[in-house]
Each structure stands twice: as structure tokens, then as C-alpha cells.
Amino acid sequence: MAIPMSDDATAPWLQLTLEAIDHGPGQLEDALLLAGALAVTLTDAGGQPVLEPAPGETPLWAHTRVTGLFDAQTDIEVVKGRLRRFLRAPILPECRLTALEERDWVRAWMDTFHPMRFGQRLWICPSCQTPPEPAAVNIRLDPGLAFGTGTHPTTALCLEWLDGADLIGNTVLDYGCGSGILAIAAARLGAKRVWAVDIDPQALLASDANAAENGVEDRIVLASPAELPAALQVDILLANILAGVLVQLAPELGRRVRPGGGLVLSGILEQHTDAVRAAFVRDFSFGPPRRREDWVLLAGVRRAV
């Protein structure tokens, strides 16, 4: 299918809009994010955008359009190939590519982001709003250099798991920390030391700033994978990464969990659950998968040697 393109090829952004006809809006949103979209919006035929709906929310429009925002230098043909693969569709849904002028995307996002609760006591709140429950565990987080605000199902699954866990005095490793949201949540919920690891220097910068904003910078150690101590083992390891990367990193992630320690894996599309479990099952016993939309979280315990 040829994708219509607007005349302005000099704009700094590209947006690819798909019609939610044969695929659900959530499926298209997830596929665009996996294909590299910097942000995703859902709209009706002419109404107000909804930026990454909160977990459990579903747009009420009968006809939904899902739009991914990409840098102007993005190779859209590569994006289209990824979308076909993620959607398992030989032909893409009806779509349109347009150039987009610069605007304050952070402000647009913050105008729609609202405090969200995960579990019984954990809230993620933008800095510009008052926490609904001041006595709860409130994490201040705004959009910035790295992905991760709690709105995506994979992050929400991890936050809910953390809310229900006993972290007091534990050491935690957040592998692929992004914005630092999981590391910060672990520290605020009682972990004594949290290692926040990412290959992206911008993610480490964002995690550092967010940890300071939430008063837990003294308990969070930022590092690239190569900077982790060789002998480091932790009580709980969190990895909210895509399934293929989890399988590839299984030996490294597995050895970082002490015998009897916990392993929490997210970022897994439901159809990849068995492959991820198989990569870790030799050393870990897993409970039933936790599901949100099309995504799965696996939580396991490392067997004693």
C-alpha cells in the first residue's frame, strides 16, 4: 500500500496514522511503540486526543485512529516492516503519513497526564498536580529524556507487583531502568539499595534526576551493564524489556539473582510468554502469568543451588 505524504518534507516530525478497523486500538498502539514511535495518540474522527490512556481505560469512540510520532529522519519503510511483523499482517491497515511542525509535546502530554494508583498504596503523580492521597507512597514523575511513566501496561504490571511485594531491607536490580520509575518505586517501598541499569546514557540521566526529585538518590546506584560488579547478586531483579532481549539476556539476568531471590520479567507480548519462560525455567520456578491487555508479567523465584 502506498502511504500518502504531505507536501512539507522539511518539518521536524513525522506522524503515521493507522485506522483501527481489523486491529484494536491497543494493538496498534503497542505495535507503534515497539516500532520506535516517540509518542502515540488515539483520536476519533475529530475529537480531543488521548495520550497513552491510563491502564484499563479504553477509548469509547466507535472509530479510532492511532497515530505514532517519529523523528523526521526515521526510515518509514523500516517502521512499516516492523508494524507488519508485530501485527502479523501481510498488509498494513489503512494509514497515512504526514509531516508535523514543532510544538511543545511535553506540555501537551502533561495537560492529559493525571495521578494514577497502582495496587493499594503506590501513586505516580505529575509534579504540577496535588497527590490525591498525601499519606500514600507518591512518586513525582514528569515526561523527559526516557520512557517510563506508568501509563504503558508493562510498566503498570511491574508497579502493581512492587506494590504488593515486601521490599523492606532488600537489594533490587532494575535492568533497563528507562526513566527510573521502577527503581524509585522500589526504593520508596523500602528497598535498602537499588541498582538502576541501562545502556542508554540519557536513561541514566533521567533516572538520576527523577531519583533526586523523589528523595531516594542516596539508595539508587546508576550504572551501565558493564559497570555492574562481577559478583553482584540481588534479592529481586526487575527487567521490563522486550521478550527477545529477555531471552538473549537470560544467562546474565539469571545469575544476578541470589538463590531464593525473585525475578520479575515484563515487556512480554502474550504470544511470547512460553519462549521467555523457557529461557529461565531451568533455574527459576514461576507463578501464573499476570496479564494486562496483550502484555504479560512473569514472576519467579530462583531455586536453591
Image (cartoon, rainbow, N blue to C red):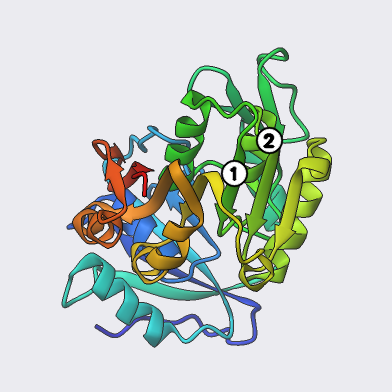
Residue located beneath label 2 in the image = 187
Query: The disc labelled 1 sits on which kind of residue?
Result: Val
Residue 118, visible in the rendered structure: no
- Residue occupying image coordinates x 40% and y 50%: 266
Q: Is 268 positioned to the left or the right of 158 in the image?
A: left
Give x and y (percent) for residue 241: 45, 59
Return the x and y of residue 131 as percentages of the image width and height.
70, 21
Q: CA distance from mark 2 to mark 1?
A: 9 Å
Amino acid type indicated by mark 2: Ala
Q: Label 2 neighbourhood size at 10 Å, few (<14), some (14-19), many (20+)?
A: many
| Nearer to the camera, 226 or 202 | 226
> Of circles 2 and 1, which is in front?
1
Q: Would you place residue 296 above or below residue 70 in this image?
A: above
Q: Which residue is identified by label 1? A: 172
Looking at the image, the residue that sits furthest to the front is 305
- Per the rendering, the mark at residue 134 is none
Above or below — where is 278 with respect to 6? above
Secondary structure, mark 2, is helix
Q: Is residue 192 above or below residue 149?
A: above
Split into 4 quadrants, where in the image is the N terminus?
bottom left
Q: Are marks 2 and 1 in contact (CB under 8 Å)?
A: yes
Secondary structure beneath dot 1 equals strand
Q: Foreground residue, 14 or 281?
A: 281
Q: Position of residue 15 (x, y in %)?
A: 50, 70
Q: From the viewer's perspective, is residue 69 above or below residue 124?
A: below
Residue appearing at x 24%, y 36% in the figure: 288
The image shows a total of numbered marks equal to 2
Q: In the rendered image, which quarter is residue 80 located in?
A: bottom left
Q: Residue at x 61, y 35 (%)?
A: 170
